[in-house]
Image (tube, grey):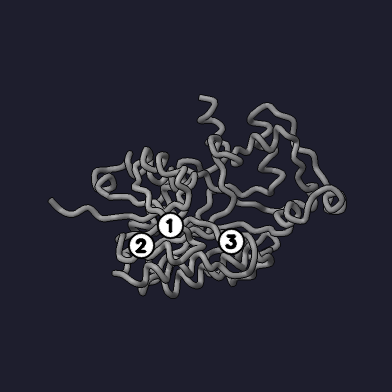
Amino acid sequence: MARRRTLLVVGCGDVGLRVLQQLQAGPARAKAWRVLALTSSPGRMAALRQAGAQPVPGNLDRPESLRRLAGLAQAVLHLAPPPAVGAQDPRTRHLLQALRRGTAPQAAVYGSTTGVYGDAAGAWLDETRTLAPATDRARRRVAAESLWRSAAHRRPGCVLRIPGIYALDREGGDPRDRVRRGAPVLAPQEDVYTNHIHAEDLAQACLAALWRGRPGRVYHVCDDSQRRMGEHFEVVAQACGLPPPPRLTRAQARERLSPVQLSFWAESRRLRNRRLVQELGVRLRYPDVLDALREAQD
């Protein structure tokens, strides 16, 4: 019997668990993979086992705990976030240092953010756009991408640039909750373009990138919607029979919202997902948030 190949998932949260579910529900060749999940939390080990992964103790902030990762897997999916402060990502550096001690994985995928582009004033972007991160949050991701693409275990890894993740069953990611609590959006004349991806479509994109991603390549993982942020939540409200979100001018927002909240209103861009569809072969289950809302109502 052929030896099963091994996939290591680093950062096995909501999206990582969906990746495991899709692997188990996939064709026989997908089910044949043995999955390891790095975790620093003993309390999560039972849940990871139940989801079909073998937990591997380790902490990205403690490089000495990662030594066992060398040569452990033929594929690596890195979904762990950087630290909350600074402009670098030592966690990704520690992971790469550990992996570099063994045989190079055949496939390596890193989940980044579309925030690396900064503000594009609503312009359409593809993956060749020059990066212009405007916050340390985005600079950490730029640093991680650079490490991953240039030194991903002696074989460049590919990068997924991910916008806002939502799902009706995702903690903190149900767009209806924001509308229900009356969270404001910008006035139409000042509104910004925003991009989204359903968590299930992101999970299938992760798997597609592991199987078909090109070394060193970048992919936008976003749906087909082309709305400004206020329009997005007005559509959600209308579909669910809820009041539309209140609108604020930027001047009003500066008086009422925190700097972190305001930072998400400082950037406007529209992303092309041609590579996702044509190169990775992803067929979006939810091309638009309305598709997810209609499914919930059926």
- Residue 85: x and y in percent read 64, 63
Q: Residue at the location (80% across, 47% down)?
A: 187
Q: Along the polypeptide, which appears first: circle 2 or circle 1?
A: 1
Taking the image as shown, residue 255 lies to the left or right of residue 136, namely right
Q: Is residue 281 visible?
A: no
Q: Quadrant of the rendered structure where residue 115 is?
A: bottom right
Residue 58: numbered disc: 1
Tell whether label 1 touches label 2 (CB within 8 Å).
Answer: yes
Q: Secondary structure at mark 3?
A: loop
Residue holding disc 2: 69
Mark 3 or mark 1, which has the lower sequence index? Answer: 1
Secondary structure at badge 2 equals helix
Tell me the CA gap for discs 2 and 1: 9 Å
Kindly indicate whether the residue at mark 1 contacts the one at mark 3 (C-beta within 8 angstroms). no
Give the Cα separation between the discs numbered 3 and 2. 21 Å
Task: Name which of mark 3 and mark 2 comes first in the sequence.
Answer: 2
Nearer mark to the viewer, of 3 and 1:
1
Q: Amino acid at mark 3?
A: Pro
Residue type at tag 2: Leu
Residue drawn at the location 40% of the way across and 40% of the way down: 46
* Image: 296 above or below 281: above
Residue position marked by numbered label 3 in the rendering: 83
**Horizontal and vertical percent position of residue 254:** 84, 53
Q: Secondary structure at mark 1?
A: loop
Q: For this rendering, which residue is in front, 19 or 70?
A: 70
Image point (65%, 52%), residue name: 194
